[in-house]
Image: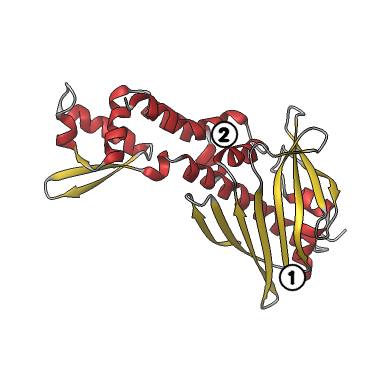
Amino acid sequence: MTVTHVHKDPDALTMVITAELEAPVERAWQLWADPRQLERWWGPPGYPATFVEHDLRVGGRAVYYMTSPEGERHYGWWEFLAVDPPRRLEVHDGFADDAGRPNYDLGVGRMVITLAERAGRTEMVITSHFPTPEAMEEMLAMGQEEGMVQAIGQIEGILAGSAS
Amino acid sequence: MVVDLLGAEWADRVFHALADPTRRDIVVRTLESEHSVSALARHYPMSFAAVQKHVAVLEAAGLVTKRRKGREQLVRGDVGTVRRASRLLDALEAVWRDRVDRMSEILAEPDGGTP
């Protein structure tokens, strides 16, 4: 049990995840700071992430893609807004086209990661703000079968059709 | 977690529940306000028991909740299951729980995962 607390706010499209990691803060920081380590945990099995750019400084960018089992690539980008090793990382995140160029159609999200020492372990808090439900769907679609993601989004549509 | 929420079983239950027009109508009505099963039954040309059955299917899919008040059973649409933003957040929570699990595995490697 490493995730210790989750807070979700559907009105603000925000989620806060608190987790405890069995490692010192400096070590935990490397999970984010080293793109080769990021690649090992960002994508689920079957949908590996590849970071082609990871310029860890304020104003720097990261560009990554996730590869589906069918070989399709979904691109995303981050822009580092705050880099305070080993305690705090803040990024804007969005989607990109096949050349890694940002696509702003679905909006831009924000993610804040803080790491704090707790008796030799690390308490990690990840605050994600999603710009639109469509961006949330796209985020999910990067790492799983698209049919399942569509299913999640359909209930309201079915009900709306019968409400008249 | 991911399997629970996004698994085929979950989708099957929800879409089977919503495949019936009476059940869809019950969800829409009970999202607006709480209804007793007997009040619902008056809207449809079927027996109380048949309506009760429909409510049970919806309850199993997590689309409505039921509570007892005296001799009545009150039914309310579950906004959390119906609202897209809530479901998407649930799915993203599952994604992050899996990510944290993978982080922990890396940190547990003998060399602490450092290359």
Q: Image height check: is A28 above or below A41?
A: below
- Location of residue A21 in the rendering, given as x and y in whole percent from the top left corner: 67, 65
Q: Could you say whether the residue bearing mark 2 is in a helix, strand or loop?
A: helix
The residue that mark 1 highlights is: A25
Q: Could you say whether the residue bearing mark 1 is in a helix, strand or loop?
A: helix
Q: Image height check: is A97 above or below A126?
A: above
Does residue A127 appear left or right of residue A163 in this picture?
A: right
- Which residue lies at the image location 83% right of the left edge and 34% below the top edge? A99
> What chain does badge 2 belong to?
A
- Which residue lies at the image location 64% right of the left edge and 35% below the top edge? A141
The residue that mark 2 highlights is: A149
Counting other residues with Cα less than 10 Å from the Cα at mark 1, is it few (<14), some (14-19), or many (20 or more)?
many
Residue A65 location, quadrant: top right
Specify the farthest residue to the right: B115
Counting other residues with Cα less than 10 Å from the Cα at mark 2, is it few (<14), some (14-19), or many (20 or more)?
many
Q: Quadrant of the N terminus of chain A?
A: bottom right
Does residue B58 appear left or right of residue A57 in this picture?
A: left
Which amino acid, by three-letter code, is at mark 1? Val
Residue A133 location, quadrant: top right
> What chain does badge 1 belong to?
A
- Asked whether A58 or A45 is in front, the reply is A58
- Asked whether B31 or A41 is in front, the reply is B31
Q: Quadrant of the C terminus of chain A?
A: top left
Discs 1, 2: same chain: yes
- Location of residue B114 in the rendering, given as x and y in whole percent from the top left corner: 84, 61
Which amino acid, by three-letter code, is at mark 2? Val
Residue B58 location, quadrant: top left
- Which residue lies at the image location 61% right of the left edge and 40% below the top edge? A135
- Which residue lies at the image location 19% right of the left edge and 33% below the top edge? B40
Please tell me which of labels 1 and 2 falls first in the chain: 1
